[in-house]
Amino acid sequence: MGLEIVTKDIQEGARAEVSRIKTEADAKASEITNEAKEIQKKMLGDSLAKVEEDLQKLHQQVISSANLEVKRITLNKRKELLDSVYSQTVESIKSMPASKKEELLKHIINKYEASGARIYSSKASEETVRKLSSLTYAGNIDSIGGVVIENEDRTIRLDFTYDSILKNVYERSLKQISDILYG
């Protein structure tokens, strides 16, 4: 019986040791699992924060791009409208009655004729300018109307063509026109 007791004691000791090792292993496994879960939660939280930050930046970029596109389209439409008004004004000048054209030419020539020696005009206005001016008629210019007066030595040219007058008024008034039309 002595051997059986010793065997039984060894077996019980071995079982107790196995149980202790198993408990320690379970505790260690549980600790490792909990650490892994915490790391996973932290990584997921960090990833979500990064995705949220990237999403916010992308959202801001999309809004900025959309705003720029809207401004570009708006400015292009404004320019188209202003160009259309400019073209309509040119057409109105071209289609003015002959009596109005003569009246305008007479006013310009009377006011500035003393400053020059030669005068230029469009082909369409040549006859009227020759009739209204005592200056030497120097030739035709490409213009919708008006005159260019030049001094004797050709160092000074006074441009009173309707093209340049309209362009100057348009450029000076562009901001004011835009403010009136678009606030």
Image: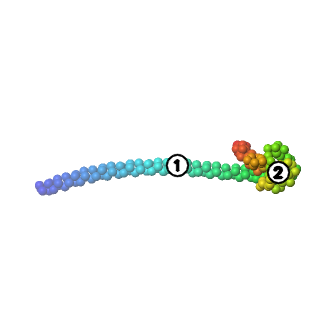
Q: Residue at x 35, y 49 (%)?
A: 35
Left/right of residue 98 with respect to residue 163 in the rendered view: right
Q: Is residue 96 visible?
A: no
Residue 1: x and y in percent read 12, 56
Q: Residue at x 20, y 54 (%)?
A: 14
Q: Which mark is residue 103?
A: none
Instruction: Give the SS element for disc 2.
Output: strand
Q: Which residue is mark 1?
A: 57
Which color scheme is applied? Answer: rainbow
Residue 8: x and y in percent read 17, 55
**Outermost residue, front direction?**
153
Q: Answer few, some or many: residues within 10 Å of disc 2's Cα (few below 14, many 20 plus, some between 14 and 19).
A: some
Q: Which residue is mark 2?
A: 136
Residue nearer the viewer, 84 or 173: 173
Q: Residue at x 78, y 52 (%)?
A: 90
Circles 1 and 2: CB atoms closer than 8 Å: no
Question: Where, quadrant-wise, is the C terminus in this rendering?
Answer: top right
Residue 5: x and y in percent read 14, 54
The type of residue carrying mark 2 is: Thr
Residue nearer the viewer, 5 or 178: 178
The type of residue carrying mark 1 is: Lys
Q: Is residue 175 visible?
A: yes
Instruction: Give the SS element for disc 1.
Output: helix
Q: Answer few, some or many: residues within 10 Å of disc 1's Cα (few below 14, many 20 plus, some between 14 and 19).
A: few
Left/right of residue 117 with respect to residue 20 in the rendered view: right
Q: Residue at x 82, y 45 (%)?
A: 113
